[in-house]
Amino acid sequence: MGSAPPPGTGRRAQQVSRRSLPRDRAAAGTRRTVVVALLANALVAAVKLAGGLLSGSTALLAEAAHSLADTVNQAFLLASLRLSRREPTEDQPFGHGHQRFLWTFMAAVGMFLAGAVFAIGYGAVELLSGPEPSGGFAVAWITLLIALAAEGTSWVRAMRQTRGEARAAGKPVLRHTRESRDPSVKLVLFEDTAALIGIVVAAAGIGLDQLTGQAVWDPAASVLIGVLLVAVAFWMGRDTSHLLVGAAALPEERAAMERVIEGHADVVAVRELLTMALGPKALLVAARVDLDDGVDAGRVERTTTELDRALREAVPDVTEVFLDATP
């Protein structure tokens, strides 16, 4: 962000203010949410698999694959929470916050494969081969009730945390969910929402199978569950990839930074302002600013220090500040 000033010029100053990435203040809550989701999905996967095998329901087997993929995804998220807390090193000077984005992207890939390969593939094979009536409807309905209770518990936990974060940010829940840089809670919330919808779809397929005696409804439900998984996986993958490759700060965060810099008495103009997300609660800020001609070298240093502090106060997620100030 600008070269070092030539010796003796006294006309150009650059301040680099850096600190280690702080631990996410919501990390404990996020970890609890992910653990609840992992336990719920592990239980549901086992129940759905047993129920699917006993009842012969293709939709339940598709849902078992769905829950198994979700369980693996929660394990990925727990790993990302642990890895992201490592201290910055010489090789990783800005910390490991991007681990959160990387492992969430991998979870999205896993969900896509579970939906596209198993749920859609297995359901399509059953449809083409002429499925037989599944029977075992009592087992299927008991399985769905157990799954609904477990998935609902996880969903309530994720929604409660999301609402609390949205309230703290002063935003509606949907907008906060869309704009949040925390991929863990977002993924859990969307996975659990998809799981609840999947249970409804599976129940519809099993119910129509039972009412009409037409076995086509059960594998058709499996295909619909797969399509749902692919859609959620695509959305999560696109959202996370944006963060993974270096997303900028939100427009309102950037606007707040510009107001802080332009509002300083010594600043004439902001020539360039660059931002990048280093993690869910970590932003890098690099700015080139023109100062008043009357500002001397000593005052330049004080000004950059004041701007550094003001930027962090205006946008709490700011953790790295690079200022190139030129009178």
Image (tube, rainbow, N blue to C red):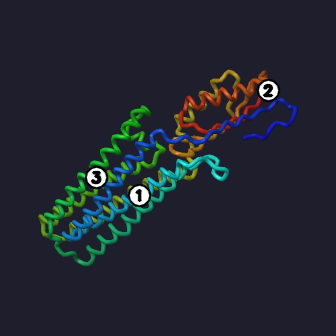
Q: Amino acid at mark 3?
A: Glu
From this view, report whether residue 193 is shown above or below residue 56.
Answer: above
Q: In the rendered view, does 267 fall on the left or right side of 111?
A: right
**Mark 2 or 1 closer to N-term?**
1
Q: Position of residue 301 (x, y in %)?
A: 74, 28
Classify residue 130 by image quadrant: bottom left
What residue is shown at x 87% (from left), y 32% (from top)?
A: 8
Q: Position of residue 296 (x, y in %)?
A: 79, 24
**Mark 3 or 2 closer to N-term?**
3
**Observer-nearest residue: 197 or 153?**
153
**Observer-nearest residue: 220 or 161?**
161
Q: In the rendered view, does 152 fall on the left or right side of 107?
A: left
**Observer-nearest residue: 101 or 271?**
101
Secondary structure under the numbered disc 1 in the rendered image? helix
Q: Which mark is residue 73?
A: 1
Q: In the rendered view, does 219 fall on the left or right side of 4?
A: left
Viewer can see residue 272: no
Q: Which residue is tagged 2?
A: 297
- The quadrant of the picture occupied by the N terminus is top right
Q: In the rendered view, does 147 fall on the left or right side of 313?
A: left
What residue is shown at x 40% (from left), y 60% (from top)?
A: 72
Q: Which residue is tagged 3?
A: 151
